[in-house]
Image (cartoon, rainbow, N blue to C red):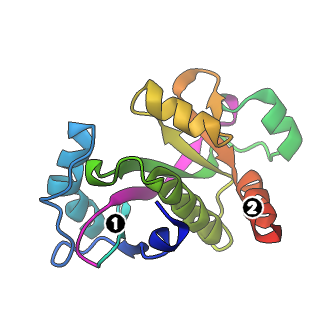
Amino acid sequence: MAEQEKQKFRFEPLDKRVHNRAAFSCEHEALNVYLKEKASQEVKKRVAAVYVLTPDGKTIAGYYTLSHYTIEPGELPDQAVKHLRLPKYDKLPATLLGRLARSQQFKGAGLGEILLMGALEKALFHSRNIASLAVVVDAIDEKARNFYLSYGFVVLPDHPNRLFMLIETIEQLFREAAER
């Protein structure tokens, strides 16, 4: 997809009255069901923020969810704990990237990266007002795991499909992109 075409896409909070959830279809039925049947309820109950990527304000090309999360210090790799010089808390604040899905209609268009960068940018922005030291994601399968690893996520030692990226790494990523 040409860069100009990618710029036509925008992120919006999910609005069940406007966005066509019924037409959305990705490779994982659980992610389809979530968007069609549960996402609006979770937004209403304030347990997840759901953002859709749309080219026209109606079509859902993809979506992601963000929620607050906590990590036990023992879950993090020792080098991360030492690097951050974290306080001796029982729980550490994080952001959960709960779901990320791209419509099959837009397969091969590079929207997975756009969705991920949108989620990371939103997490970084909010971490400046509500503390979060990392973004955590549970990869739905090996393909998703490899996708996150390719962007610099790190596996949590005791959970092979749970990965994280420090907020300071995300900040550096966007700083370097802005300098290009």
Residue 159 is covered by the magenta coloring: no
Q: Mark 1 sits on what residue?
A: 46
Left of 21 or right of it: where is 149?
Answer: right
- Residue span colored magenta: 57-74
Q: Who is closer to the viewer here, 74 or 171?
A: 171
Q: Can residue 130 be seen in this view?
A: no
Residue furthest out toward the front: 2
Q: Which residue is drawn at 77% across and 55% down?
A: 168
Residue 97 screen position, x and y as percent? 48, 50
Q: Of the residues under marks 1 and 2, which one precedes in the sequence?
A: 1
Amino acid at dot 2 = Glu
Residue 34 screen position, x and y as percent? 22, 49
Q: In this view, does 60 lie above or below 102?
A: below
Q: Which residue is drawn at 63% across and 37% down?
A: 150
Left of 29 or right of it: where is 6?
Answer: right
Q: Considering the numbered disc 2 on the image, is that residue within a helix, a strand or a loop? A: helix
Q: Which residue is drawn at 16% across and 56% down?
A: 36
Q: Mark 2 sits on what residue?
A: 171
Q: Is residue 65 above or below residue 152?
A: below
Amino acid at dot 1 = Arg
| Residue 128 picture quarter | bottom right
Residue 4 screen position, x and y as percent? 51, 74
Name the quarter where the C terminus is drawn.
Answer: bottom right
Residue 62 is covered by the magenta coloring: yes
Q: Viewer-nearest of labels 1 and 2? A: 2
